[in-house]
Image: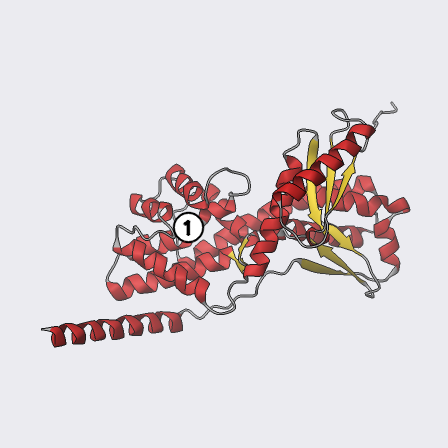
Amino acid sequence: MRKLEEESKEEMARKANTILASVIERCASTYTSENTTLTVALPSDEMKGRIIGKEGRNIKTIEKLTGTELIIDETPEAITISSFNPLRRHLAKKVLEKLIADGRIHPGRVEEVVERSKEELAGEVRKAGEDVLNELGITDFDPKLTLILGRLKFRTSFGQNQLEHAVEVAHFAKLLAMELKANQTIALQAGLLHDIGKALDREVEGTHMEIGADIAKRFKLLPEVIAIIEGAHSDNTKSLEAVIVNTADAISSSRPGARRDTYENYIKRVTDLEAIATSFSEVSQAYAISAGHEIRIFVTPEKIDDLGAEKLARDIAKKVEEALVYPGEIKVTVIREKRAIEYAR
């Protein structure tokens, strides 16, 4: 009996390995780990001075409105955009390309271009979600859910692009379900949406599993799909499809080179840095730049005076020292701008 039991276990292990190997071979997609910079080509080095503007007004406006840092150095005919947030980097690149093509570069024009670029970026997010659904053959998703899905294009986890990861998990889950005679529709949808909560976890409180389950319930997805999203990354699986999705997730994320822990630690540090600054009521915007070694904080001028801004900088620096562990030092810059507007009629 023991001999038969051992032979049976060996046979099951061989079959499991065969299934996994065949699934992986049939879905050989590739990843490029997300970088933290983008480069914009310039028609000439003279354009650098126009982007900087008189007393740096243009570049300061671009950096403030996009939440990025523009690095202008000796590199010929190029400007580097630096930010830990891929969405902000992409927005800044679109803004710069439009300004360079137009030729008119001044703070008022920058504000107009940023607003228009934000609208175009929203269209790109929607298209990214629609392209994924077309690739997977899914036709019954609500347009708003498609938009949320598209946001994963600008979200990374351990350096791995979340939308590419979601598509890969969906492919793996469907193929595994096919091999194991499970429900392919449930496996496909749950695989695609298992991390959908990460699209909104920077704006909504809760774990990405809780946020994802709430999204799935709001759009009235299948109860089995909701249960799998809610129990993602959990060992308390209640169905074969849940086991399949967890297995597909592990296959995608464990491949050598797919993820980088140091990148994720960096993201967490700069996100926490911004969160500390925005926890003060006087702060309207805060952006971590220079690889997290500086944070620029914009305050509401009506809520604080110049002396108060100096005190706020000390208070934030002290709170950062108490809450975070980081190499070197972090420069805290508080910016208070008073803008007066009147119309000549």
Q: Quadrant of residue 159?
A: bottom right
Residue 67 seen in the figure: no
From the viewer's side, name the closer residue of 242 and 119: 242
Residue at numbered disc 1: 193
Q: Answer few, some or many: residues within 10 Å of disc 1's Cα (few below 14, many 20 plus, some between 14 and 19).
A: many
Under circle 1, the secondary element is: helix
Q: Nearer the viewer, residue 301 or 272?
A: 272
Q: Position of residue 82 (x, y in %)?
A: 71, 55
Q: Hey, which quadrant is residue 15 in on the image?
A: bottom left
Give the residue displayed 70% in from the left and 33% down from the top: 283
Is residue 85 found left or right of 199 in the rendered image? right
Looking at the rendered image, the quarter that the N terminus falls into is: bottom left
Residue furthest to the left in view is 1
Q: Amino acid at mark 1?
A: Leu
Residue drawn where x is 80% and y is 61% of the image: 42
Relative vertical location of residue 78 with respect to residue 202 in this rendering, above or below = below
Between 161 and 148, the one nearer to me in the picture = 161
**Residue 321, how many percent across, how many down?**
67, 43
Q: Is residue 272 visible?
A: yes
In which quadrant of the rendered image does the C terminus lie? top right
Where is residue 293 shown, x and y percent of the image?
72, 51
Q: Residue at x 50, y 55 (%)?
A: 162
- Determine whether 181 is above or below 337 in the image: below
